[in-house]
Amino acid sequence: MHVLVLGGTTEARRLAELLVEVFPAGARLTSSLAGRVAGPRLPPGEVRIGGFGGADGLAAWLRTHRVDALIDATHPFAGTISFNAAAAAAGAHVPLLALRRPGWVPGDGDDWHPAGSLADAAAALPALGRRVFLTTGRMGLAAFAGLDELWFLMRSVDAPEAPYPARMEVLLDRGPFTLDGERELIRRHRIDVVVTKDSGGAATAPKLAAAREARIPVVVVRRPPVPRGIPVVDGPEGAVAWLREHFSHQGWATADPAQPSG
């Protein structure tokens, strides 16, 4: 059995860790990373880095490497690969599962402003604040490049490339982040508005709590659409359970994803 995980997320790494523990003898795991981050944290098992060449290229890879199951555990905003995965899996007749972390939900005291895109988020900013904590990643900064009257603190794993806002300080950092750290960042830089994508998960959620405490608005970019009709789980354990159910005839019947062996 050969499982291909489209990864690059915390959940994908955790899934790979679980799978190498509970895989039946002779099974093969390959994790695929897009290669957009320098020095990524590599999961256990085989790793390939780079694109496939669209849906047709991925379908060919599935057939050539005799993949038995495909798991889409990519970032919620990596929308194109999810549609490519759906088309490729259908074309190659390979079972597909989507592992999607739940989105964030506003709570009492939150001042959230939903946006349909980065351009919509940029359009909303002048009415909300002047010192922006921008946490949407290094891609797509061109949407904010014309806001010369605003100051930006942009945080990402890797340095951005132009075009980007003229008045911008770059903070290179990688989550998970702490609530104390986010409180101090907002205080030290006198942030009065936050921009984020609805990435979900716990690693970057403390900024939302810090913004709530500081009573500052948060512009939240909604997730892009995803393919319909694909089975979905919200965590790595669910993905292992799905694999065990589909491949119990290959030694999975005694494997417990909640209690890995070894």
Image: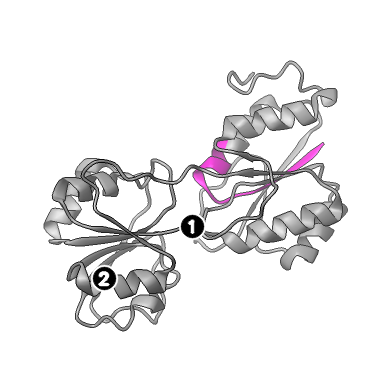
**Front position in the image: 235 or 177:** 235
Q: Position of residue 30 (x, y in %)?
A: 71, 45
Q: Residue 223 has which mark?
A: 1
- Answer with the quarter of the image where residue 160 lies: bottom left
Q: Secondary structure at mark 2?
A: helix
Q: Position of residue 226 (x, y in %)?
A: 61, 56
Image quarter where the N terminus lies is: top right
Marks 2 and 1 close (CB-CB < 8 Å): no
**C-alpha gap between disc 2 and disc 1:** 19 Å
In magenta stretch: residue 13 = yes
Q: Residues within 10 Å of mark 1 (few under 14, many from 20)?
A: some
Going by the numbered disc 1, the residue's amino acid type is Arg
Task: Indicate left or right for 138 with 241 as reference.
Answer: left
What stretch of residues is rendered in magenta? 1-14
- Answer with the quarter of the image where residue 69 lies: top right
Res. 49 in view: no
In this figure, which residue is indicated by the disc labeled 2?
Answer: 125
Q: Position of residue 174 (x, y in %)?
A: 38, 52
Q: Is 238 rendered above or below residue 33?
A: above
Task: Give the residue at the far top of this rendering.
Answer: 254
Residue ID at (50%, 56%): 39
**Front position in the image: 200 or 115:** 115
**Front position in the image: 100 or 226:** 226
Q: Residues within 10 Å of mark 2 (few under 14, many from 20)?
A: many
Going by the numbered disc 2, the residue's amino acid type is Leu
